[in-house]
Amino acid sequence: MMEPVLIIGGGLTGLVAAEQLERAGTPTVVLEREATPGGACRSLSDEGYTFDYTGHLLHVARPETQAYLEELGLWRQLKVHRRRAAVVIGGHATPYPVQINTHGLDPEVRRDCLLGFVHAWADETAEEPADFRAWVLDRFGEGLADHFFFPYNSKLYRARPEELSLDWVGRYVPKPKLEEVVDGALGLHDEDVGYNATFRYPASGGISLLPNGVAGRLSCLRLEREVTGVHLGERWVELADGEQLGWRKLLSTISLPALIDRLVDPLPEEVAAARRALRWVRVLNLALGVEGPAPSTEHWLYFPDPELPFYRVGFPSNHGDLAPPGCHTVSVEASLDPGVGDVEALAAGAQSALAGAGLLEEGALRVRRVTVLDPAYVVFDHHRRQAVALLRDFLRQRGVTLAGRWAEWKYSAMEDAVLDGMRAARNLSDAG
């Protein structure tokens, strides 16, 4: 019997790739270490509350994504929402994105942001900035840099702005026109901008609707099967229980460093060095079920203040049916360096800070869940591009395809996860 296409990781990308391959009649096996499919795109329920593993909202821009979700019967189960998000600076909240909505900020902060943008606009050059720090100053000016972009991204990526490259900014950081910035300072701007101006979310239940919808069509999904070793030369993987499985082609959707760490073949020094160059942060997610109405009507809030441990706080029940009547859910996200820190102590500190910010009545707390997403965000430093290219080429020459956010070591959203899975399946099918 022909060896299968073996997929490591039953997250959204791996599931979609498997569904497409099975549909084409390609022998396929998906190995997922958890008891439920979905990877980071999962939900859990507790006492009537539903929590996603951090915020997961679907932004659909490509017709093939919609067509695929319609085919799975999922599209009509997704409700459209217009984004309600704000940035909180110095205790003042103003709509997101802050660069065109400074009107809600303290007058002195607003002045800094407006003058800084005008100076940057007047002095803008065609020269490509060398790093994220220079890019922000050139594009937005000192005020927005100092009050939002520098502290927020330093908190999120646990890195200095000059350590970050420009490979990740793209569609995620919209640049406004001068007129938009002035209108935003005066409160005259009411148009939503950015890739996430609208989003879709299940009308009932959590985001696990998506992976469960794909997984329900698979016969090749094997849960609670953790891959502990990958032999590239002999083309087999070893599972935690000692089982060995051969493969004809290997598709990895787990994180790139996790895959490299599982290789049993001796690594060339340049490959080992590229693996060491990969940087990332973990995210601590404090999920709370709380009695009473939410303290904010926003879907989520951004917090650049370095004194606060969290960078984002969401109220998922404001966009989904995720809490019992008269109750709400809160999702708190704090960035952590890999492998360090007392998670429970950090969660307790985040909860205390949340209460101090007026966003939690601790006496009304009914459910509390702490999870850690590791890795969560790739750190786009100046070594990432070269390291990823070297590792990708090394693996491709040995029959391994990478697909998805963490396998390709990039920043992407759920629609990209679906498209990555479809593309990987096409490439594997075309390769024969």
Image (tube, rainbow, N blue to C red):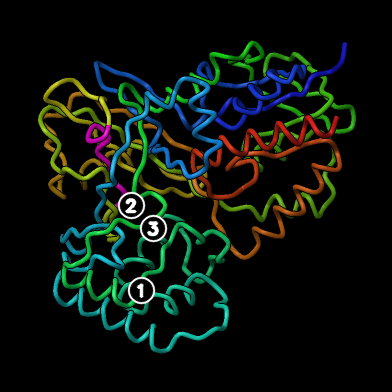
Q: Nearer the viewer, mark 1 or mark 3?
A: 1
Mark number displayed over residue 311: 2
Q: Left of 319 or right of it: where is 391?
A: right
Mark 2 vs mark 3: which is more N-terminal?
3
Picture coordinates of residue 288 (x, y %)?
25, 31
Determine crowd level at label 1: few under 14, some 14-19, many 20+ residues with C-alpha closer than 10 A. Answer: few
Picture coordinates of residue 269 (x, y %)?
82, 52
Q: Which residue is drawn at 60% across and 25% down?
A: 15
Q: Can you say whether 360 is above or below 204 in the image?
A: below
Give amino acid for label 1: Lys
Residue 184 image-quadrant placement: bottom left
Q: In this rendering, does residue 313 appear at all?
A: no
Mark 1 vs mark 3: which is more N-terminal?
3
Q: Which residue is drawn at 27% across and 83% down?
A: 115
List the residue tagged with mark 3. 155
Q: Can you say whether 165 is above or below 248 in the image?
A: below
Give amino acid for label 2: Tyr
Mark 2 residue element: loop
The question of residue 310 being in magenta is answered with yes
Q: Residue at x 45, y 79 (%)?
A: 138
Picture coordinates of residue 297 (x, y %)?
16, 43
